[in-house]
Amino acid sequence: MKSTSLKYALVAVLALFAVAAIAGHPILSPDLFADLGALGAVPFMVGDTDMGELTKLLQKQGEAWEEFKKTNDALVKAKADGSVVSDLQAKLDKINTDMAAIGKSMTEIEKKAGRPELSAENEGKQGWKDLNVALKAFGRDGDNSKLIALHQKAMNSTSDPDGGYLIIPELDLSIDRIAETMGAMSRLASNVTIGTQKWQKMVKTAGMAMRRVGNGATGGETTEPTFAQVEIEVFPAEVEPWIHNETLEDARIDLAADLADEAAIGFAEGANAEYITGNGVGKARGILGYTMAHNSAYAWGSIGYIRSGKSAAFASVAPADRVVSLQHALKAQYRPGAAWLTNDTTLGVMRQMKDGSGAYYLWQPDPAAAFGGRFLGSPVEIDDNMPALGAGSYSLAYGNWQRAYQIVTRSGTTLIRDNITAKGQTKFNFRRRFGAGVKNFEAFKVMAFVTGTA
């Protein structure tokens, strides 16, 4: 725990240095930032996080952004002058691609910083020793005696009738933590673990209104509050890595860590796709899996949207105006803590937007807040599951995701070992039960890339 906290603290400090240096902060000299960049030339590790590499990436992001602004300004001027712009456009596209790659590299470092270590940090802890010994024995030759004991210690509320063994909490936590850093929604949304089939919550959708009553008069009954019930059901999902028996026999790998990684990646990629576009039939229901309604006709149970003003693109004239409208379509009480949600390609277009005077870019790099930077003061979260710009696409969303979206996990991850059905290989079947859905429909809004007024 201490090591993880130290990682985050150092990441935050370096991020603040970088942002201040990029902004030309008078207290932080360029020499100081250069010294920070030089850390990449010497070993500087916290756990498995290379802080020197992070510093280099922060510096590269700032340099790339400055070059992006210069190139985009030159592109705008060339278009106004009627000059050929193909070379400038190609250069701008390359910088955009480079900035996206830098952001992804920084996210990878963030994953390592927040990831529990299965062996290094916990090597001396008896629970982790027992887990590694039990899983290696079970994985290599099917010896389940030690795993049975750990299964009994886990005190988990779920069980598997077909010979599965519940992963003890430490490894289950590892799977959760890795999944949370692989996609934006799994990290942004509210998460809860339940012991039943469904998660239910009552939501008050309308309150009572005051009215004036004349002196000595009787007013009578006022409108009563209205309620809606949100229900999210969990469904089973599985990940099944197959390992050659020869690999198990040699067993020089850390089997517990390898299986946790495989399960985590599989669960995370599948789940995060569902959190955006899932239809709720035997799976999670994503933020785009509900009925869409223009925000002027929004009603509880639907997702409110505003129009971009152009099919498959932002408006040709003053494109940022519609983005401002989207931000203010969200009620003021939800905007503190709200974030933009989009993919890299759409963000690349948004980076070119300026204010009405044409003097200031509306996007700014801010690794201290989010590796997608900030747009109109709110963090930008990158999720590649968001649709690409297209006719009628919903490629940009803005919301308070903690209040808007709920991920529900049925407690326990089950592992079944099968060395019978596939000759020469052993299957490790990880099974989980989870679901997700919108719990507050007014806590986020989306942009539809279609023609028409906002």
Image (tube, grey):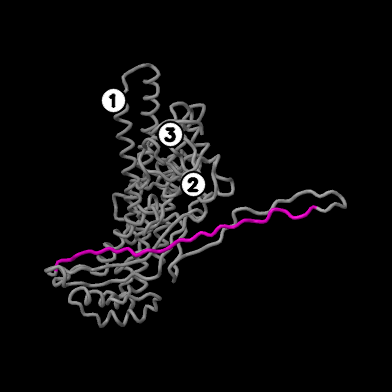
Q: Which residue is mark 3?
A: 450
Q: Closest to the observer: 46 or 103?
A: 103
- Whole-angstrom CA distance, mark 2 to mark 1, is 41 Å
- The answer to whether residue 352 is magenta is no
Secondary structure of the residue carrying tag 2 is: strand
Among numbered discs 2 and 1, the one appearing first in the sequence: 1
68 above or below 423?
A: above
Among numbered discs 1 and 3, the one appearing first in the sequence: 1
Q: Could you tell me if residue 410 is visible in this image?
A: yes
Tell me which residue sits at (21%, 73%) in the image: 139
Q: Quadrant of residue 96?
A: top left
Q: Which residue is mark 1?
A: 87
Q: Main secondary structure of the magenta part?
A: strand
Amino acid type at circle 2 is: Ile
Instruction: Report whether 238 appears left or right of 286.
Output: left
Q: Closest to the observer: 119 or 315?
A: 315
Graded by Cα atoms within 10 Å as few (under 14), some (14 to 19) or many (20 or more), the crowding at tag 3 reads many
Q: Position of residue 91 (x, y in %)?
A: 30, 30
Extent of the magenta region: 219-244
Among numbered discs 2 and 3, the one appearing first in the sequence: 2
CB-based contact (under 8 Å), mark 2 and mark 3: no
- Whole-angstrom CA distance, mark 2 to mark 3, is 16 Å
